Amino acid sequence: MDVDLRDLELLAATAEAGSLTAAAERLYVSQPALSQRLTRLEARLGMPLFDRKGRRLVPNAAGRRLLVAARQVLGELDSAARDLREIRDGRDRRVRFTAQCSTTFPWLPPVLRAFRERAPDIDVRIETVADDAPIPALLADLVDVALVTKPDLQMDRVSLTRLFEDEMVAVVPAGHPWASRAHLTARDFDGADLVLYDFYDQKRIPSLPLPIPVGSRPARITTMPVVTDLVIEMVAGGQGVTVLPNWVAAPYAASHGLALVGIGAQPLTRTWFCATRTGPRPPHLEAFVEELTARLATPHSGQGGG
């Protein structure tokens, strides 16, 4: 696609300002020059990007799609420019944090409060990365600290601090045959319809292991966006069963008529780690890791994510 940075700036400015005249003022160019640039861009793409509604220019379907990309690219460039200024001025004192399964973070505010009391001049940024990409993001220096649980082929290239374990449970309607069971076996999942977060989609490369006993053969797996409410509604509506951390599922049990059932005679658990790049850590980063570890590396503190 023949689109450059100036095209993205044009698109974003016009969408926000609503007219080429106002957009031209923002970009410090003349209105005729900007109009010609937009005409050339639309000609290269073979489609218009804006519709006129009254006196305003409004992005159409094509314009809205390209606008999403424009804002992502321009936002990342702004962030990079800010980081470079901080590095240049010797103010590179920030912590970029991410986590897998980031549907909820009930533990995060206390960690941030404690850390900011300890280091008020350090900027903590919560970065969003794909649930299967925190380790690559760490190795690419896009984040400094990652809370991880799922296996990654590159885990041996980072420093891991063990934090806690949380139990995975089957979530079923209260009237489901499993609801009265003490625990489930691999054979129970044979022929079952599963509703899972989309990072368990086995068609993805790489795919994450299913959160059920090895050897189970479910009949159907429906994957959903990483929105716990959506998965819970599907289960409550009889569209299948799911597997979630106990602490994630428990608040929904009474309100949605659900039962939580253990998996295996020995509970099925997963282990959470604090991951950083190998080698010495700057003092401010060491302080953040210490605070995170102190608050999460305790029994039954498993409040990491979905």
Image: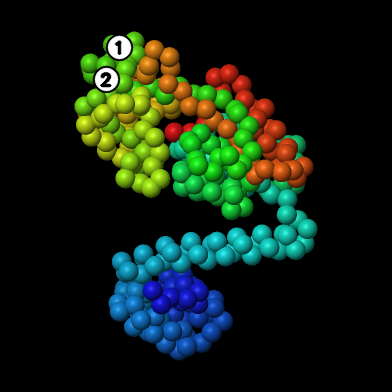
Distance in Å between CA atoms under marks 1 and 2: 11 Å
Outermost bottom residue: 32
Residue 167 lies left or right of residue 110; in this view the side is left
Residue 19 visible from this viewpoint: no
Question: As shown in the figure, which amino acid type bears the numbered disc 1?
Answer: Arg
- Residue at figure coordinates x 48%, y 64% from the top left: 71
How was the colour assigned to the protein in this rendering? rainbow
- The part of the image, by quadrant, that contains residue 300 is top right
- The part of the image, by quadrant, that contains residue 90 is bottom right
* Image marks 1 and 2: residues in contact by CB distance under 8 Å: yes
- Residue at figure coordinates x 35%, y 17% from the top left: 261
How crowded pointer 1 is (Cα within 10 Å; few <14, some 14-19, many 20+) is rated as: few
Q: Position of residue 141 (x, y in %)?
A: 62, 52
- The part of the image, by quadrant, that contains residue 68 is bottom left
- Residue at figure coordinates x 51%, y 87% from the top left: 30
Number of numbered discs on residues:
2
- Tell me the tag on residue 188: 2
Counting residues from the start of the chain, the first of labels 1 and 2 encountered is 1
Q: Position of residue 53 (x, y in %)?
A: 31, 73
**Which is more toward the observer, 51 or 280?**
280
Residue 270 lies left or right of residue 217; in this view the side is right
Look at the numbered disc 1 and give the secondary structure of its residue.
Answer: loop
- Quadrant for the C terminus in the image: top left
Look at the numbered disc 2 and give the secondary structure of its residue.
Answer: helix
How crowded pointer 2 is (Cα within 10 Å; few <14, some 14-19, many 20+) is rated as: some
**Which is more toward the observer, 248 or 204?**
204
Q: Is residue 97 above or below residue 56?
A: above
- Residue at figure coordinates x 35%, y 26% from the top left: 214
- Tell me the tag on residue 302: none
- Tell me the tag on residue 181: 1
Q: Is residue 202 above or below residue 4?
A: above
Question: As shown in the figure, which amino acid type bears the numbered disc 2?
Answer: Asp
